[in-house]
Image (cartoon, rainbow, N blue to C red):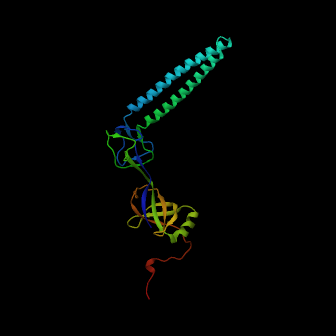
Amino acid sequence: GVGTARALNTVTVRPQVDGKLIAITFTEGQDVPKGFVLAKIDPATYQALYDQAVAKKAQDEATLANAKHDLDRYLRLAATNAVNAQQVDTQRTLVAQLEALVKSDQAMIDNARTILSYTDIVAPIAGRTGLRLVDEGNIVRSSDATGIVVIAQIKPISVLFNLPQQELPQINKGMDEGPLPIDALGPNGKTIDKGQVLVKDNQVDPTTGTVKLKAEFPNTGLQLWPGQFANVRLLIDTLKDVVVIPTGAVQRGP
């Protein structure tokens, strides 16, 4: 059959926060690992929000510590009936409220830290970068549809192809025994890569009478490229101990 190569995974990298793009740290066409910092957004505003959240927690922790000291005093005084029980209960409630406030402050710190980390735009997958879609110095927003760059995972790469429905019984039988070997052929008919058929579609296309299959190739030599057409040859079965003769030995005539 004839197949179309597709990247195993494709991701359009978009900013998750708004701001000025202060650095582009990748080269177009570069292979990047997962987590690689592709670009940086000016972190000044988000750093200030994080520092503000940290300061708020420190302030509330100081208030909580003072409230706990007062509660300890009230408890000692209550033991000698110097204060009534209502004052102790009120102070205990205040301590509980302040403890909850400190936990809320910690959640705000975690949120601010997460947002601050979004100023480093990282690669969500390992793959090859495409052409840069925005230049350094531009204001980028999380609502931008174009993104920063598109990353495609091409090692390994997948190939989608169709085969006639008449071949389906043999394909089903072969795949029941395990992944089927498949060859990708170059323009000269020679094998350029070997892979495996991983999955077949769950229905036959009634308009063409074919079933779609998906194969995966290691593509270590980058012989296959996303969007490229490729001839594929699927090995269903191997006949054992059969008689074969060279094609040139066959004479045709009346």
Residue positioned most to the bottom: 254
Q: Is residue 48 above or below residue 137?
A: above
- Most foreground residue, 118 or 53: 53
Where is the C terminus found, in terms of image quarters?
Answer: bottom left
Q: Position of residue 174 (x, y in %)?
A: 56, 66
Q: Is residue 237 visible?
A: no
Q: Position of residue 54 (x, y in %)?
A: 47, 26
Compared across the picture, whether 157 is left or right of 71 comes to: left
Q: Is residue 72 visible?
A: yes
Compared across the picture, whether 99 is left or right of 2 comes to: right
- Most foreground residue, 82 or 103: 82
Q: Classify residue 4 by image quadrant.
A: bottom left
Q: Is residue 92 above or below residue 204?
A: above
Q: Classify residue 83 by image quadrant.
A: top right
Q: Residue at x 39, y 31 (%)?
A: 45
Q: Position of residue 20 (x, y in %)?
A: 34, 37
Q: Residue at x 48, y 58 (%)?
A: 216
Q: Classify residue 241 by image quadrant.
A: bottom right
- Most foreground residue, 159 or 205: 205
- Most foreground residue, 95 or 233: 95
Where is the N terminus found, in terms of image quarters?
Answer: bottom left
